[in-house]
Image (tube, rainbow, N blue to C red):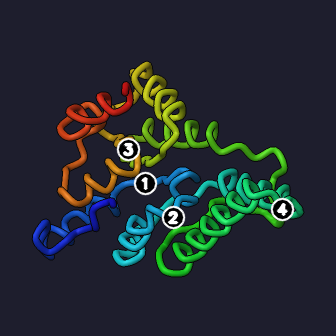
């Protein structure tokens, strides 16, 4: 079982406020695999409770909607499970929109049939980093993490201290332990992230 966020013995209310301020000064992106997994409910409880904005890409939302439509008449056990995960993701997105400043950027009247979020995550995050904006990206997709890290590492215009790339468990630990933002090379991430990714 994953640790609960911000237990009283772990972090004080003052530290809570400080961490929330740090989070509000970053652009936060959650991959679809985080939205679709029921075991990460505490992530969404924390974001909603503290009214923290999450940036949701149009292609990310459209990709999930397209998949849901594709599976509509599929009654296989695999399809039923996936439809359940997609319904959970849309529920969480709606809750974030209703209860925080989160929104879907440039959403249209219907989904783009060719939507593919991974490329847009990389392009959007690189664009923000080139503007010296700070970003948190949370994904369970190791391939996507590797591609993004490599492109950032190869780009001399980007300050690597402005990016935190986490899997879900690392993001939870980051919040629970009130880790300061230090890029994936520093502190907590230097000690843990690459070891996990290479196992």
Residue at horizontal 47%, vertical 34%? 145
C-alpha gap between disc 1 and disc 2: 23 Å
Which of the two discs, 1 and 4, labels the residue nearer the N terminus? Answer: 1
Q: Mark 2 points at which residue?
A: 38
**Residue 187 in the image: above or below residue 152:** below
Relative side of 190 to 44, left or right = left
Relative side of 23 to 33, left or right = left
The x, y position of residue 57, in whole percent, is 62, 54
**Residue 164 in the image: above or below residue 47:** above
Which of the two discs, 3 and 2, labels the residue nearer the N terminus? Answer: 2
Q: Residue 151 carries which label?
A: none
Which-is-in-front pick, marks 4 and 3?
4
Proximity of marks 1 and 2: CB atoms separated by less than 8 Å: no
Residue density around tag 4, few if under 14, some if 14–19, many if 20 or more, within 10 Å:
few
Which of the two discs, 2 and 4, labels the residue nearer the N terminus? Answer: 2
Residue at horizontal 20%, vertical 33%? 191
C-alpha gap between disc 4 and disc 3: 34 Å
**Residue 88 in the image: above or below residue 190:** below
C-alpha gap between disc 3 and disc 2: 18 Å
Looking at the rendered structure, the secondary structure element under dot 3 is strand
Looking at the rendered structure, the secondary structure element under dot 1 is strand
């Amino acid at each position: 079982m994953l640790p609960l966020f911000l237990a009283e013995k772990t972090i004080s209310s003052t530290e809570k406020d400080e961490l929330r301020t740090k989070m509000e000064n970053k652009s936060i992106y959650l991959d679809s695999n985080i939205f679709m997994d029921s075991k990460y409910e505490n992530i969404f409880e924390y974001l909603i409770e503290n009214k923290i904005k999450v940036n949701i890409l149009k292609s990310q939302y459209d990709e999930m909607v397209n998949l849901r439509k594709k599976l509509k008449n599929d009654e296989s056990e695999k399809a039923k499970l996936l439809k359940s995960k997609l319904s959970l993701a849309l529920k969480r997105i709606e809750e974030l929109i209703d209860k925080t400043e989160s929104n879907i950027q440039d959403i249209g009247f219907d989904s783009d049939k060719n939507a593919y979020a991974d490329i847009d995550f990389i392009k959007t995050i690189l664009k923000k980093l080139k503007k010296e904006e700070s970003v948190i990206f949370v994904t369970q997709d190791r391939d996507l993490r590797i591609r993004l890290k490599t492109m950032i590492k190869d780009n001399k215009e980007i300050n690597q201290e402005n990016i935190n790339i986490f899997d879900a468990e690392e993001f939870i630990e980051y919040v629970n332990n009130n880790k300061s933002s230090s890029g994936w090379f520093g502190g907590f991430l230097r000690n843990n992230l690459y070891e996990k990714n290479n196992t």
